[in-house]
Image (tube, rainbow, N blue to C red):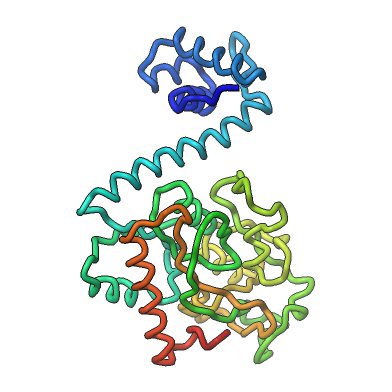
Amino acid sequence: MADLETRELEYFAAVAEELHFGRAAERLSIAQPALSKAIRRIEARLGVPLLVRTSRHVSLTPAGEALQHHGRHALNAVSAAAQSARSAGDAQARIRLVIKPGGDADLLSGILAEYARTPDARRVDILFGGATDRADHVRDGRADVALLYAPFDDLTGLDHRTLAVEGRVAILPAGHRLAARDELRIADLDGETLPRWKEVHPTMHPTAHPTAHPAAHLTGTGSEGSGPEVTDVPQLIQLIMVGRTVAVLPRSLAEPAHPGLVYRPVVDAPPNHMVIAWSRRDQRALVASFVAAAVAASNARATRGTPDAHDEA
């Protein structure tokens, strides 16, 4: 069976997203009959129907859903390859760093300062991702490097270096039954309502382990939680304040402390690793230079004895 061409994937992706041949054809700037013929040619080549067509409705078959998912990854990979080729030959190329707002463990300023001192330093564009999608930014080429939390973030397909290791804290309402304790253990939180972290993309990365849900790592209790769904830490803090949930977070994500809440270390929770990650396929010197600067900055911080650095492991 012949491979599909990139243009054919683009045609199918447009139809799959629009679920309307007219709108898809307009988006692609081609005639609708030509688009319909192209889709039929793809189905014939693959030997499976991709769409269910009626006079009023277009929907995806299971085969169509599979091609939409994997085809989008393939198109993103092609785009990333082209971008990498352009960047490799562009003396003005920038480094694109994706982070979670407030989720840099106070490392960002030191990393940027250290990188600025390197002879080949480029401009660094800071991108902001959500709770669960920053690794995808790197995998699909939207970013070159990312600051990620392990084991919370899925590192499939990425290389990484650890920058800092930190403990986890439970965040509780002031009147909570555990608020008077100096420290907690995971077992103390049995029966508590824990949050569910909303994934930005409902489709899991195709090589991820099916039980490795990011929320299971963030709760620190080995479960996804049964409480309210949250998308970011500020939203979580509001829900804790009104008694809807409690949470276990990496120490740096729990700062600054809210005066109406209680923060207690969870001494047997697995440590959190702040890592800098990049695609295994990306061997560009500018990426290696930025990673080296990030590691040097984190080592310098650990040497100064800054809390939550490497010696917390």
Q: Quadrant of the C terminus?
A: bottom right
Asked whether 172 or 267 is in front, the reply is 267
In the image, what residue occupies the spot 48% across and 70% down? 161
Q: Is residue 108 left or right of residue 167?
A: left
Count the marks. Answer: 0
In the image, what residue occupies the spot 62% across and 81% down? 174
In the image, what residue occupies the spot 62% across and 67% down? 218
Q: Which quadrant holds residue 243?
A: bottom right
User: Compared to 308, does 108 lie above or below?
Assistant: above
Q: Position of residue 181 (x, y in %)?
A: 68, 90
User: Compared to 168, does 127 lie above or below?
Assistant: above
Q: Which quadrant holds residue 303?
A: bottom left
Q: Position of residue 257 (x, y in %)?
A: 49, 80
Q: Position of residue 50 (x, y in %)?
A: 62, 21
Q: Quadrant of the N terminus?
A: top right
In the image, what residue occupies the spot 43% across and 92% down? 305
Q: Position of residue 283 (x, y in %)?
A: 39, 57
User: Compared to 21, does 148 lie above or below?
Assistant: below
